[in-house]
Image (cartoon, helix red, strand yellow):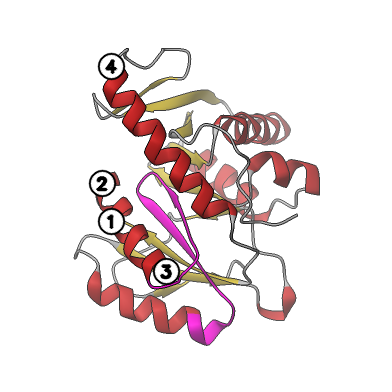
Amino acid sequence: MNDWDDPPRSRDEWRVEVALDRDAHTDTLSGALHDLQLDNEARKLLGGSVIVTRDGSYLFVYAWHEQSAQEAERVVKDIMDHEKLIGQVRLMRWHPVAEEWKDAEEPLPEDEAALAEEMRENEEEGRKEASYGAYPWEVVIDLPHVRETFKLADRLRGEGFPVKRRFRYLLVGANTEDDAVELGKRLEAEVPDDAHVGVRGNPGDMPLPTFVNLSALKPGFLRDLGL
C-alpha cells in the first residue's frame, strides 16, 4: 500500500469527533490508535496516515476524504467496544463559509460559486498529493488556521517537497532522518510562533503508525519517532 496515495474522491474536510466520559479513557483510546497495526485493506480505506489531536476528554481524527473518515469512525468504535470505553462518536464535515464543523449528514450550503471554487481547489490538491510515494520519515506541521496550510503547502510543493494537507496540518515526506530533521528545524524558524513542528520516522524499519498523534507536540522542535 502506498501510504501517500489519495483516492480520486471529493477533497473537502472530514473528521471524527470522540467525546469520552473521562480523560483517562482518552489516554486509552489515543494509545490504542497509536499502537494499532492495520491490514492493507484498512490502510487503503483510510488513505494512509490520518491525524489525531486531543482536547481533554475529546479526541479528533482528521481524515483524507469521506471514505477515510468512515473507516476511521469504524476503527474508533471497534477499539471503544473492545476496551469498554464510554463515549459518543460523531462523523463531522467542515463548512468553509461558516468556518465550523457540523454533522456530516447536514448538507453544505448551496452557495454554488463558493462550492465550485472549493471543489476546484480540492480536486487540484488531490491531483498533486496522489503523485507522491511512501516516505520513511515525515515532518508534521500544526498551523493555527486552515488558510495558512494552503499557502505553506503550495510553497513547499514549489520547492519540490512532497506534501499532504489535512485541515490545519501538513505532512511532508522525507527519505532520510537527516533530511527530515533539517527541514523540520528550518520550518520551525519559518512558521508562526503558535505553530508546532515535529518529525516522525521508522528507525529499525518499524512501520510508521497509521494514526499520527499530534497530542504530544509542544512548542519547539520535537522528534516523534512513532515508538
**Disc on the earlier residue, 4 or 2:** 4
Q: Is label 4 in contact with label 3 (beta carbons under 8 Å)? A: no
Q: Which amino acid, by three-letter code, is at mark 1?
A: Lys
Disc number at residue 198?
A: 3
Front residue of this view, candidates 187 and 72: 187
Residue lying at 62% horizontally and 69% vertically, measured from the top left: 135
In percent of width and height, residue 85 lies at 61, 31
Disc number at residue 151?
A: 1
Mark 4 neighbour class, 10 Å CA radius: few under 14, some 14 to 19, many 20 or more: few
Front residue of this view, candidates 107 and 58: 107
Q: Is label 3 in contact with label 2 (beta carbons under 8 Å)? A: no
Q: Which residue is mark 2?
A: 147
Seen in the picture, residue 44 relative to 156 is either above or below; the reply is: above
Q: Which amino acid, by three-letter code, is at mark 4?
A: Asp
Q: CA distance from mark 3 to mark 2?
A: 20 Å
Mark 3 neighbour class, 10 Å CA radius: few under 14, some 14 to 19, many 20 or more: many
Q: Nearer the viewer, mark 4 or mark 3?
A: 4
Q: Which residue is mark 4?
A: 111
Q: Which residues are magenta?
A: 159-179
Q: CA distance from mark 3 to mark 1?
A: 19 Å
**Disc on the earlier residue, 3 or 1:** 1
Q: Is residue 70 left or right of residue 186?
A: right
Of helix, strand and loop, which one carries label 4?
A: loop
